[in-house]
Image: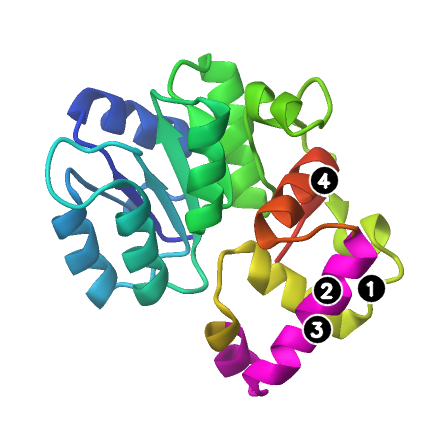
Amino acid sequence: MRTLIIDDHQLFSAGLRLLLAALVPVEQVVRCADGAAALDLATHTAFDLVLLDWKLGEGITGEPLIHRLKELLPAARIVVVSGEARPETVRRAVEAGAVGFVPKESSPELMTAALTLATSGGIYLPVSALNDAGGPAAPPTGHGLRELAEAFPDLTERHRTVLSLLARGMSNKSIARELDITEGTVKQHVSAIFREMAVASRTEAVYLLATRGVRFE
């Protein structure tokens, strides 16, 4: 899993790389300190996982950076690792296309568990965000991830495929290109998925996947 870390605090970035070493081969982890460098790297390298700080010191950051990264890396999992973890900030990150949010204040054990979820196909959101959304008291942190077919047995195989791509933050256009179908067909699938999950948006779907501890490929 080729991973990109974007953080202007070099000490934290180095520590994050060390935590990842038990999960991802070190040679597959690349670090940079700003959005411009990240976009340049993403232009030439197909990263599978991106860990980025919500607020970088200068240049493009936050939602605009996530949007640009999703254009270059539509299938990548983007996880925000930030010192600011208010529920509204978490929601903004997820709405922009992130599939996880890890507070920097997390203990090394919790950070490792969150990164394990991210590299295993799960979603980590902080307790405050899940409580604010009416979810459980704590997000799942162990290895017991559920498959989509188990969590939502009434979804068809095609719907599960579309949901997996949607959960990564891929646009309808990107999903249509990936599956070689029309955008209209994607919209029909998404509407059916939302009805089955009883949600109204991708953001709500991501929160639900997080609270149920679901793995998506």
Q: Which residue is mark 2?
A: 160
Mark 3 and mark 2 lie on one chain; the one further toward the N terminus is 2
Which of the two discs, 4 and 2, labels the residue nearer the N terminus? 4
Q: Amino acid at mark 1?
A: Leu
The image position of residue 76, as x and y in percent, is 43, 57
Mark 4–mark 2 distance (CA, rounded to whole Å):
16 Å
- Specify the amino acid type for callout 2: Arg
Proximity of marks 1 and 2: CB atoms separated by less than 8 Å:
yes
Q: Nearer the viewer, mark 3 or mark 2?
A: 3
Residue at the extreme right: 154
Q: Secondary structure at mark 3?
A: helix
Left or right of residue 112: residue 2:
left
Instruction: State the mark number for residue 155.
Output: 1
Query: Tags 4 and 2 in contact by the CB under 8 Å rule?
Result: no
Range of residues picked out in magenta: 175-197
Which residue position holds label 3?
189
